[in-house]
Amino acid sequence: MKTLLDSLMVNYPYFAAMILFIIGAFTVLTRSNLFKKLIGINIMESAIFLMFIAAGNIRGGAVPILDKANPKALYINPLPSALMLTGIVVSVSVTAFALALIIKLYQFYGTTDARRIAELKKEVASR
Amino acid sequence: MTDLVLALASGAAGGILIALMPRAGDRLRNIVALIFSAAGTLFSWRVAGAVFAGRTIRISGEIAGLAWSLHPDPLGAVFGLIVSTLWLFAGVYSFGYMAEEQKQRTYYTYFLLAFSVTLGVAFSGNLLALYLFYELLTFATYPLVIHERNSEAMKAGSKYIIYSLSGAGAILIAIIIVYSWTGNLDFTGGPLLADCGLRPGLGWVLALFVAGFGVKAAIMPLHRWLPAAMCAPTPVSALLHAVAVVYSGVYGIVRVVYSVFGHELAGQLHLSHILPWVAAFTILVGVIIATQQDVLKRRLAYHTVSQLSYILLGAFTLHPWGLAGAICHMISYSTLKVTLFFGAGIIAKGTGKVRVSEMSGVGWQLPRTMAAFGIASLGMIGMLPLNTFWSKYYLMRGSVAMGKWQLALVLIASGLINAFCFIPTVVAAFAEKGEQPVLEKGSAMGLMLAPTLLLAGIALLIGLWPGLVWPGVDAVVNWFF
Amino acid sequence: MTATIKSNLPVFVVIMPLFVAFVLPTFARRIRLVEGLVTATTALGFLGAGYLASLILIQNGNPINYSLGGWSAPWGIEIQVSNLSCFFLLMVAGVSLPIALFAADNMTHEVGGPQQTTRFYALYLLLGGALAGMAVTSDLFNVFVLVEVATLSCCGLVSSSNHPWASEAAFNYLILATLGSALILGGIGFLYIITGHLNMEFASHELNRVWQGYPHVVWIAASFLLVGFGVKSALFPLHVWLPDAHSAAPSPASAILSGLAVKGYAICLIKVLYNVFGIALIQDFGIHRILTLLGMIAIIAGSVFALTQDKLKRRLAFSTVAQVGYIFLGLGLANSQSLTGMLFHMASHAVIKSGLFLAAGAIIATTGKNRISEMAGVGRKMPITMAVFTICSVSLVGIPLFSGFVGKWHLLLGSLEAGNRLAQAVIIVGSVLCAAYLFPIIRVAYFEPTPVADCRDPGLPQMIALIMLAAWVIILGVVPGPFLELAKRAAIDLLVMK
């Protein structure tokens, strides 16, 4: 029990990422509201970002700007943060695109509920 | 070599030509079909002649890095001879039978394409080419099966495709296994697997091959597509479902047993003690079911199922006598069965009767047809003046020589049941004499009648003078033993 | 000038379509120019891919390494043109060229006005560029970025159709695909945490050195990647988005989605599995067994679902699910024959499925009917379209002389080598089922009596596109020569540990 608690204390960003990821995935898969699905996606992606950035973090590390006076200073790894910048851009564009699609769907079906849309679609198909 | 190319090309060329002549009259189309069938027949006779004279004809190449070759050997030549000769007869018969039918263009297109493909099966010199033509045959004959375009025909067509493709799949697996063992698919230079010796999995390969080709050879229980396919026009049933298509399956099995395994290797497998009995089972059950059928074409179909296994039985004896019987039966049975089918077609066209129970008195309306039909029926029993007597003789000799005399009994029993199958029909046809007009008149009837009578004549001729076909049979047996 | 282009060709084949894609919207008013540009770009891409392939073939398969910005790996981003890359580049270029031709002058009724058409083309080129990038990249994070570019352009292509159902299909696709991307990014993250590298070669080296320390993390990374790429490449049962998306999209989009996009993700999975994890690790973890099993299930299930569809494009879409199964099956059997077969099947399916979707699109466009049962007599009215459809169907079933046979032949040899009898049976059953769901279409089109009212073959560019695809099918089936050689070498490369 002690070891688990210890590892939890040391690796808490990873556990947080895991919990966020599960919350996100659960939201995406179980909610029928399109907005909530989208929010779930965003939560999930945040979890991954968190994990990446935590991986690059070094406790006690400084901001990775080369300090000529102190060449042996401990820096955090800048690469994951840089990568996650790209990840965030991707995530934003996905969100924007999804919102545009939701607007289009709302214009046609008058609802943002996935189940209701499926029902309406069946009605149209049967007609 | 040119002969080989021309033999294969003439059917395909004719088919494509007919497909491209959209509004041609029936007459012109018939002439084109006749010319190209005759050309195919002529060239395949020349090929066969060259093969029997001992010359080597070979064309080979590569598809996607895999070698293929066309290389007729005596067995292929005999098969090619049977097919091409009967194709010409069936072509002439079609001109009469199809005269008033719809969709003649489609019919003749695929009729001729199937000719090329069947010759391809006969002349192929390695497993890849054999497989290719065997697959193509399914597609080339599919439009002929669904010629009537009604729901029954469509169902039969789907059944045919699914059965055939499943069979081809089994063959493909077997070919792949053989390829992985030998790295070679060519079977013209002695048995392909001869150097492999006995090894685990060999029996499975043979089983896969037999099951795969057995679909088209209508081994029970893989025969279900054949009676269903009888909804096709009669010339198609006669030629394809009594000879060409089903023979390609039989031919495939004989090929595999003798050219891929070789009789020595095959004899060492346990399976080769079971296979004759599978054939015997099909012989008996097929003919018994045939006697139960009322629709004449269905009766003929089940009878085909039974008779094909005669050939297989002969091949499975792995004995020179048995093989001789098998080849003899291939030749004899095809002439007789086509005669029977042609007769059934004339009866259906002339009187509109398709059921055996309706046929009393038909003989006086169609005397010459029923005479030919009667001769063929006698032949199916294996009576002496007819060619099947000789094949049955060799088949029995082969089974006894193999040490399975029980198989000879099966053959005799089957001959007796055969007698019940057709003789009562013929007797009934001539039994009731009434004031009925003779229907065998008109050019269409003439075109149907001539090939029928001619084939019955050929069957008699071979029966009286078996020396006519013996050189071919001898060549095949000498090739493999 | 030419020397510069030649030495930078690996980058150009990726950058060029991306660049043109962003320029296109400025020409939106001159739709002819847009179409010309797109066709020229894909044609140039094809030439470039051909040139690279010939280089690689001459060099006996030594990969061309290209360091972006002059920073060499592991610090910089590396592009590697290997046998696999050339194979996939050729496949992408060879298929996207006819699709671009088919789309020319033909898109307006499916997507709306010239504005929308231009956007469609921009997305099309973006997707092409992303796929080319997937072929050459050897950097894990680039894989993620390219996967995202491809996903977004795929969703855009699906939603470009006028029909409101398309938006819904695109939304579902987007949600599931983003879920997949998140998993992929997570998987890459775990790999990075263990190895500290994003370059595949270095990551692989490090992973094989240290993995015993973190077996669970490796497991999690593998399963994240497998599920992530599985969703994207429509591995049964993660395929749920595919039938809607591929049938709702405009026909050229369906063709490139089913033909290429799905394969792009598969290529990424292949690279990650074989170039990073490596064959030894795959076998230690038993991943190959999972892949084989999933592949077999996909073949059977996809085919059975396809059988029950009456809408033409949906049937073709489910057929893609089945064919993806062959790719995963070949991947799982993990020997050189099966990998060759898998790669070749991938290419031949790309060509075949594009041909099928384009022919289906032409039929639906002229007749206005999308159900198979309503297509009686189409074969006589649209002979060339239906001939191409037939050639492609026969090839997909796997008849010799057509491309499908070559792939299946090697897959069967591979399953024989792996001693997997069940896989052989499944491959054959899959072929028979494939015939069962494709031949009824041909039968109805050619042999059903009542002809549809008025329809004829599409215009010249469309015909050229269709004939080109049919020609690919036959060329690949009869003389695949160098192409098959590339696949063989690529398969051997995958099995060699660096």
Image (spheres, grey):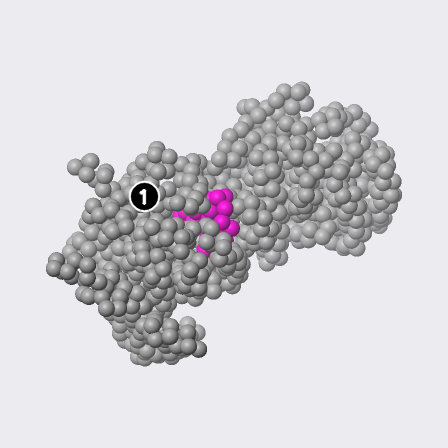
Numbered range of the magenta stretch: C324-351
Residue C262 colored in magenta in the image:
no
Measured as percent of width and height from the top left, residue C19 is found at 20, 51
Measured as percent of width and height from the top left, residue C408 is found at 51, 46
* Amino acid at dot 1: Val
Residue depicted at x 85% and y 40%: B404
Q: Which residue is mark 1?
A: C81
Residue B86 visible in the snapshot: no
Badge 1: chain ID:
C
Residue depicted at x 71% and y 40%: B338
Q: Quadrant of the N terminus of chain C?
A: top left
Residue C336 colored in magenta in the image:
yes
Measured as percent of width and height from the top left, residue A127 is found at 42, 74
Instruction: Look at the magenta stretch and give its main secondary structure.
Output: helix
> Quarter of the image holding residue C452?
bottom left
- Please state if C455 lies on the left or on the right of B178 as rendered: left
Secondary structure at badge 1 equals strand
> Quarter of the image holding residue B341?
top right
Q: Quadrant of the C terminus of chain C?
A: top left
- Please state if C243 lies on the left or on the right of C6 as rendered: right
- Of all residues shown, which one is farthest toward the left? A69
> Quarter of the image holding residue B48?
top right
Residue depicted at x 60% and y 35%: B182
- Please state if C320 lies on the left or on the right of B411 as rendered: left
